[in-house]
Amino acid sequence: MVAQLTEDTKPVPAGGTPLTHKRENLWQDAFRRLVRNRAAMIGGTIILILIFIAIFADFIAPYPYDKGVLTDQNKVPEWMGTLFPTMKPYMKTSDKYPFGADYIGRDIFSRLIYGTRISLSIAFIGATISLVIGIIYGSISGYFGGRADNLMMRSVDVLYAFPGLLFIILLMAFFRSSFAKPQVGTFGSILGQIDSHMGGMFFIIIGIGLTAWETTARLTRGQVLSAREKEYIEAARTVGASDVRIMFRHILPNIVGPLIIVETLAIPAYIGTEAFLSFIGLGINPPTPSWGAMISDGAQSIRTYPNQAIFPALALAITMFAFNFLGDGLRDALEPRMRGSQ
Amino acid sequence: MGRYIARRLIYLVVVLFVVSGITFLLEHAVPGGPFDREKALPPEIKANLERRYHLDDPLLVQYGNYLNDVILPHLTFHPATNNMDEDYLFNFRLPGGLWLQWMNFGPSYASRSRTVNDIFRQQLPVSIQLGIMAFFVSVIIGMPLGIMAALKQNTFFDYFGMSIAIIGVSIPILALGPIMVWLFGVDLKWLPPSGWGAQPPYIMGFIPHQLGWNFFKYAIMPALVLGIGSSAIIARLTRGSLLQVIREDYIRTARSKGLIESLVIRRHALRNSLIPVVTILGPLFAALVTGTFVTELIFGIPGLGKYFVTSINNRDYPVIMGTTLLYAVFLVIANLIVDIVYAFLDPRIRYS
């Protein structure tokens, strides 16, 4: 802030040329701070690359993700022997596959590329759902207050006590077995079909959506409560603005900063949840490639073929780093005083 | 204070009802019961099995019985017979021949000779051991890192410590686990890649009898992997809170009266700055103990988390339900204890 003041308030020269005052709003200011943050920029770049990979997966991946060559089971390229020396005595080499082939001869590299789609879709859709439900719920609760607020927040408290991972596991177990073979033509069968077309992603998104909005709702409520008392809201009310208009025109733009920060920082958790669900076999349906499922398959043979678990693990870790770095940078940029304080 | 605690206990009961209700509904809405096999059982046998476990009662009756067995404490003159249907997790003898019995989760469907409480007694201690060690890992790494970063704000120490914290928060167990297993377990052969070094019986229900290298060599990797994420959270929180406290007036007073810096930090700054950190320790501890699924699966640890995942695939209703309820109680009580400790640490806080 200090630096900005000295930049912008140049003394008026003796000749009396008009003061060139560069006006910046909150967002431009935040953006400038974000660009200066190297870690956040690296994170952002990685995310852009990942988005590119996800969109053009069909052109980048050298092999299909679902069809293996059985004779190429567990084959690895030559250089893998130097990286994982324990494999040297028994490994079968083939330079066809950059990161090796898995236990049924599918190219791990191609599966990693396609896996980007799953992780990123979950990340963005999960965040959107959580934001939409959380903002609506939280702002209704905070804006109207009183008994409705009390009741709404008590129910969130009770949901909060539900052990998060257990809840989503239960939900997934329910979805997976209820909609597996429902009667044709029912609502359940439509949901089941949507899900199988999306490779199992639909129910994961619903599961994450149902469990993730509570934090957003609480935060929104708190922010709305404090924004409601400000003078500009009173001013808006005096000139006769409706509740909806006050909510969306006046309060929401002023509280959206913290919400974006929290949501960006929550994205790694959504990616992690999907990977975890796929790891325990309740997530993505095979053969759709999910990094979590690949880690799970690879973990079975980690003593013999460590590459099969370690490369998906690295992909998952890098993606989560990228979102965390960006989220952290966003927080520093939008709320400079919050740096490092969770 | 007493009224506050009473209110929180009532809240605990509400939570138990809601959690058990949702769990009960979800698991019974799932088509396919616990006795559906690849090869269908003869209908008579299936009917008998269902009668044995009271699955043929109306749902509401089943739920009512379950609540009665689990949530309501029983006061009787009859000691529990300890057969499959009468196994209480808490079974105390009171003066005058009275027995206080509480939390009978019933028999497990999948492992026919064990009750849910048997499974808890054998598997839960392992998860608790793992959770406690991960908790110590996170505090021992996190607090010094945060304190160092705050005292040397905007120096190399600060940036280095906080970068480590971001990395710690971001790296998922699912990724770090396999990498560690391969590196230290398979390649370097320093530590066993899987297994657990303690067996029942345990002291006080969860402390293993031998706490030597044979126990810790199995525990080092999982505890580190599980605790590292929380250590980062603690580090950030400690740093933020200490930075705030250092700018308070009473710190300036302490300095201006000539107190040496280390005393200012130890006596005045640290104590006050740890209050918000303590509040997060409770939920963190609860989350560590109840969140051991992935760690247990990756490191092949026979804890409750691993068992829970298996029980879902087996449709072992009593185990699923029991674990969920037990973990929920655990979370609520951990939060309650933190709130009470909070009031003692900071006398300005009054609950009314």
Image (cartoon, helix red, strand yellow):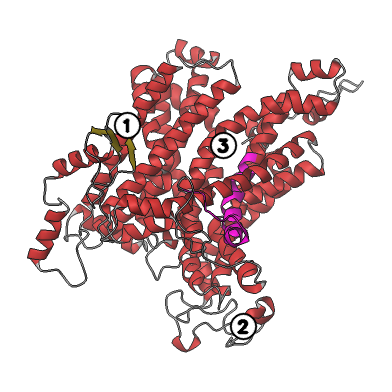
| Magenta part, dominant SS | helix
Between tags 2 and 3, which lies in front? 3
Q: Residue at x 63, y 57 (%)?
A: A46
Query: Is residue A316 toward the left or the right of residue A217 in the image?
Result: right
Residue lying at the far right of the rendered structure: A14
The answer to which of B120 and B248 lies nearer the viewer is: B120
Local SS, label 3? helix
Query: Is residue B293 toward the left or the right of residue B164 in the image?
Result: left
Exactly how many numbered labels are in the figure? Answer: 3
Does residue B110 sit above or below A59 in this rendering?
Answer: above
**Magenta stretch contains residue A164:** no
Verify CB contact (< 8 Å) between mark 1 and mark 3. no
- Percent x, y for residue B160? 76, 47
Give amino acid for label 3: Leu
Q: Which residue is mark 1?
A: B94
Q: Which residues are magenta?
A: B206-234
Q: Chain of mark 2?
A: A
- Percent x, y for residue A209? 39, 45
